[in-house]
Every structure is written in C-alpha cells, then in structure tokens.
Amino acid sequence: MTGFQVLLVAGTHGNEINAPWLFDQWSRQPELIKTNQIRVCRVLGNPQALQAGKRYLDCDLNRSFASEYLLSSSSQDYEVHRARELLALHGQEGSSPCQLVIDLHSTTSSMGSSLVVYGRRASDLGLASLIQAQLGIPIYLYEGDQTQKGFLVESWPCGVVIEIGPVPQSLLLARIIDQTILTLEACFKQIARIKSRTIDFPSQLIVHSHIGSLDFPRDTNGNIKYCIHPSLQGQDWKPIQKGAPLFISSIGDTIYYENDETIIPVFINEAAYIEKHIAMSFTKKEVLPVLDEWKDSLDLLINQD
Amino acid sequence: MTGFQVLLVAGTHGNEINAPWLFDQWSRQPELIKTNQIRVCRVLGNPQALQAGKRYLDCDLNRSFASEYLLSSSSQDYEVHRARELLALHGQEGSSPCQLVIDLHSTTSSMGSSLVVYGRRASDLGLASLIQAQLGIPIYLYEGDQTQKGFLVESWPCGVVIEIGPVPQSLLLARIIDQTILTLEACFKQIARIKSRTIDFPSQLIVHSHIGSLDFPRDTNGNIKYCIHPSLQGQDWKPIQKGAPLFISSIGDTIYYENDETIIPVFINEAAYIEKHIAMSFTKKEVLPVLDEWKDSLDLLINQD
C-alpha cells in the first residue's frame, strides 16, 4: 500500500500531441502545474503511436481495456499489451497503484474544455460535480452503447477524460495547452480539498447523457456521401430541433434532423471517429442531484490511507 | 499527340482527404464542376497513403519528383515508384500526356484559398495572374530553398498547387470542398479563355515570394520547446514587424521577431511541417508586371494542337 496517487495519462492517442508535450515541459519545470501536494504518476499512454504520429498501431488503446481483451492472452495487438502493462504498473494491484485516473485527450470537434464520464459511477460523478462547480465546463456522460467499450478510465476505481478542442491531429496549439493546464489544476485543487476534508460539494451536476451516435450517410460501397453541414460544424453542445440541417452533399442537397425531440450534438466531425462510423453523437441534458453516496465514495477512495 | 489535357491531382498527401472526396463525388456527378470543355485527367496522387490515412508511406510524394530520385533506379520507396508511375501515365512523354497540372492540397494553416507556384516559370506566373485576377487570392512563390525540392508540379511544363486551409488532417469540411470547387472552376474558366483566345490578362501579378523558413525553438535533444504564439496562430498572410510575438513557452516566455524588415508569414503551424523543421515560412510581397513572355508561353502550351 503506497497511499493515494493520481494517474495522469497523456497520449493515449498518439496523434493528440498537446498533453504529451505538456508532460515533457512539466518534467523540466516541476512548478508548471500546481498539484496541491497530490501525488501524481505521469505516463504516456501509447508511446509507440506517439512516436509514429498515429492514433494507434494495431487498435485503439482507449477501447483496449475491455475484460475480454485483458483476460485473453491471445491478442498480439500492441495496444492490448500496453493496456495490460499500464494496469500492471498503475492499476489497483499494480506495482505503483493509483486509485484515480485522469486521461488527457484532444479532439478536432469544438468541444471546448470538457469532461467525459463513462457510466454513472458514484466517484466519477462526485469528481465531475466538483470540477464543473469550479470551471463551469460541460460533461458528456457516455453510457449504454455496446459498440464502444473498453475505455481506459473504467479500469480504475475513479476516472475521467479531459477532452479539449478543436485542434487538428498532430498539431501543437498554445490555447489547448492553456486549457489543459487550467482543467488539470482544477482537478488537483478539488482532490486536495477532499483530502483535507475542506470540500464543499455543489447541490447538482449537469450532464449531457449519451442518446446515440449518427454515421455519415454512405453509399452502398461504404463511401461517405454527405459531409457535416456548415451550419452545424463547430456547434457542439448547442441544442438542435426538428428541421436543423445535419449533412450536405457536394451538390448542396441537405439532410435535416427530423425528430421532435430537442437534442444536443457533441463530437461533431471528430476526424478519428470516421472509421468508427460516427459523424456526431447526440445527448440530452440532465440535472442530477449530488448524492451523499458520491461524496462518501470519493472520500473513501482518496482518504483511505 | 492527344492534344491539350489538364492533369488534376488529389490526395498527393494521403491525409488531405477533401479533394479525393470531391473527385469521388465528381465521378458520380459529372456536372458537379464546370470544366468549360477543357479535357481533364483526374488522378489520386498517393492512393496507398490515402487508404492508410497517412501523409505518405515511405517519403513525401510531393518531394519525390527530384531528378536524382526519378533517374536512379535504386530507391525502393513507394512514393518514388508512384512519382515515376504518374509521369509514365501523364507526363509529357506519358501514355496520356498532360501539359498542365493542378495539384490540390489542404493545410492546417489559415492559408484561405491560395496558390503555390514553384519558381518563376513564365507559364505558371501567367496562369497564376489570371486566377488571381478572377478570385483575388494570394500566391506563395516558393523559390531558392534547396532543402525542399522535387515538387510534383515541377515535372510538368506548367503547374500550380491549390492550397486551402485551415482544416485538420483527415477531416472532411464542406467549406474546404466549396473553396476547392470555386478555385478549380476559376482555373478551368481561365484556361478555356486562353484556348478560345478571348483572354484578357491583368497588368500585374502580386506574389508573396519565399524568404526563408523558421523552425520551432528546440532543446538539445531536438524536442520542441516553444509553440506558436496565440497572437500569431491563424494570422497567415498578415505582415509582421519587429517586436511581433512568434513563439511562447509553457510558462509564458515569449520569443519576438527581431529584424527590422517587415515580413509576411505563411504556413504558420502546418502539422505536417513539424517533421520538416518548419514552424512557419516568411515571404515578402512583390508586384510583378505581367510579361508578354508569360502570355505567349501559356498560349503555346494550351493551343499547341
């Protein structure tokens, strides 16, 4: 037992280079990010993909933490090997165990600074409520989609993704670096307040919970026929209603949103999701009361030693 | 002799996917782009890299047309093989020869719609002057840099690059598609006017001629220490003077432009140029009179049959 440690992961996708660059700078300047005396383990998620300038070598590392991959010894994929390695190092039973993980991502979508939470674990929702109370950032609650699973943070007792955009793949942007630092420091500040038992939870948490994802319209060969409509491009987190344009063809044919329910699109035109057949995802806004269970869960996790 | 044909190349870089997508749509809808009865050969520059979602497999195709590569049979690089193949198909001595090439690119830099011309060939400058007179777009005149050579368009008697941005790599954007169509149609319109001898040249051509390129400040291990300053990001084509911020470190240290000469940066923060050690290039504005030699050269090339 080594006591509470936070695992920070950068470069889970090798073409998201801002957080890895920040780690490199931080290692040379320990004062760069205020950690509020929280013990931190920093790790590059996918160093080989980072070196190659690619999202991944064999398969998406952030889909490689599914139990069927981790328990089966048959996979030769580098990322499945790397998932096991990260757990052996920093999993709960690892050599330098961490109890909470923050996985740093960037996106070509206009997500701003945001968090992604997977499912409704008490500890994740509690942590998200504190960060949202400090920064006011939106939270994408991803759940109920069996086509996408095996996310890194799910293999730790508590974990969130920090998702920041827009930024092209493989590009350094000072704005993204600044937003990453700001969000990370908020995480440390809130964790430190739990540790010192000076925490004051908000009364509610606003989440945007996943409804479903929509692919690009494709032809019978699987080729994309329509691209994102210019009036939707960059409009993540903004509600759309029946009649809103979604897609446009090269000759200007438009496809509209046709349901009566108002929805809120996120991850509009994330470059890496084309291969996953996701042009955007839809969410609905939910206001959740902050539960004692969330607070207790976080306290137990962080103040265990 | 098959008469005058224009070669159009999309996907010379496999992660610039807008022009290849446009070609695919165009092949299904022949009326999509007005060619003014100009005969066109469309080709994907680097189909294997496009398939792999990468800029290139072995080396940059748009640096593979240097004579030392083309004449030497020793290179095993796919792109050198592909360069030879494109010339065998559509070079002047090829099986379906083209006399003029338009190479369609996109960039993460905020270049807008622009042309790149390599050196001061009469035919290229003449064509550029006509397109600029119609659209008013800026032209980057690249010359005098021995570290970057072997560009595709240099292997044809006349050729320009259409460069459009900003757009992330591997992302479809309707805006980029529209800008590509608009610029291509201007090319066809002007070529058709030369062909019908109804052309009216402007009196001058404004170019931004290459002075040099600047790398990111790096440490002794070659790692980037500073990123593009936020006040410079996205400011391509805008003159800067002594004292303008160029780079910023993670702790806010700023590096300023220190020369007395006013310069105009282009290709600021192009993701693919990090490996080429180019953070931006500098240009100076020149106003060139349109010469009879330019007009004659184009007329000879286009009206040879």
Image (tube, coloured by chain):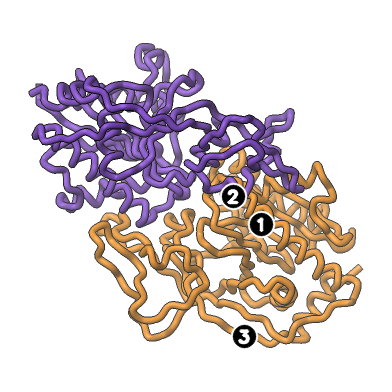
Chain colours: A purple, B orange
**Marks 1 & 2, CB-CB < 8 Å contact:** yes
Q: Name the residue under label 2.
A: B16
Residue at left offset 55%, top offset 45%: B170
Residue at left offset 69%, top offset 33%: A218
Q: Distance between the residues labelled 1 and 2?
A: 9 Å
Relative to A2, residue A242 above or below: below
Q: Distance between the residues labelled 3 and 2?
A: 31 Å
Image position of B273 (left or right of A256): left
Residue type at tag 1: Leu
Q: Earlier in the sequence, mark 3 or mark 1?
A: 1
Considering the numbered disc 2 on the image, is that residue within a helix, a strand or a loop?
A: loop
Quadrant hosting residue B302: bottom right
Considering depth in this image, is B195 or B74 the residue closer to the camera? B195
Q: Which of marks 1 and 2 is nearer the N terminus?
A: 2
Quadrant hosting residue A219: top right
Q: Do the dots labelled 1 and 2 sit on one chain? A: yes
Q: Distance between the residues labelled 3 and 1?
A: 25 Å
Q: Where is residue A37 in the image (x, y as percent from the top left)?
A: 11, 41
The mark found on residue B104 in the picture is 1
Q: Position of residue B262 (x, y in %)?
A: 44, 83
Quadrant hosting residue B36: bottom right
Residue type at tag 3: Val
Q: Name the residue under label 3.
A: B287
Q: Do the dots labelled 3 and 1 sit on one chain? A: yes
Q: Position of residue A19 (x, y in %)?
A: 32, 45
Considering the numbered disc 1 on the image, is that residue within a helix, a strand or a loop?
A: strand
Q: Which of marks 3 and 2 is nearer the N terminus?
A: 2
Mark 3 neighbour class, 10 Å CA radius: few under 14, some 14 to 19, many 20 or more: few
Considering depth in this image, is B88 or A203 the residue closer to the camera? A203
Q: Do the dots labelled 3 and 2 sit on one chain? A: yes
